[in-house]
Image (cartoon, rainbow, N blue to C red):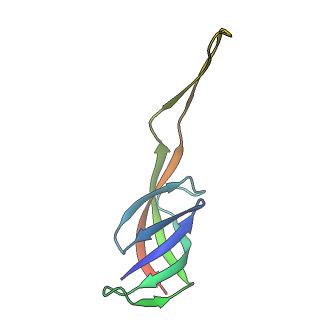
Amino acid sequence: MYAIIETGGKQYRVAPGDVVRVEKLAGDAGSEIELPIKAAFKDGGELVAGGGTVRATIVGDGRGDKVTVFKFKRKKQYKKTIGHRQSFTDVKVGDIGA
């Protein structure tokens, strides 16, 4: 059985036991959270339900690799370099309550 969950404006396909990297969530490592289900499916691909929750445990959090952004306008002597590191949370999926 697997489910489609939504968190941080993105959707993820998860199954029990999966570890998924999602947008930063509030909570400490080891705490349990519930994520809303968009759809749940049996192993054969048959739709079981829409709605319900997935119980998950926060494994840890961190920040991704740095992405360098370089802005440039020719003939104007304009150059600007900035960097960005996106925060994330690793979540281990428990049972799917469809």
Would you identify the image quadrant in which residue 13 lies? bottom left
Q: Where's residue 20, x and y in %?
A: 41, 60
Camera-side residue of 13 and 29: 13
User: Could you say where residue 45 lies in the image, as x and y percent from the top left?
Assistant: 35, 85
- On screen, residue 93 above or below 71: below
- From the viewer's perspective, is 37 left or right of 21? right
Which of the image's four quarters has the N terminus? Answer: bottom left
Q: Residue at x 49, y 53 (%)?
A: 89
Quarter of the image for residue 51 reads bottom right
Q: Is residue 3 above or below residue 65?
A: below
> Whole-percent x and y of residue 39?
50, 81
Q: Residue furthest left?
A: 44
Q: Residue furthest right?
A: 76
Whole-percent x, y for residue 25 in the image: 58, 57
Q: Residue furthest front?
A: 75
Residue 91 drawn above or below residue 93? above
Q: Residue at x 36, y 75 (%)?
A: 16
> Which residue is drawn at the image coordinates 54% and 45% (left, top)?
87
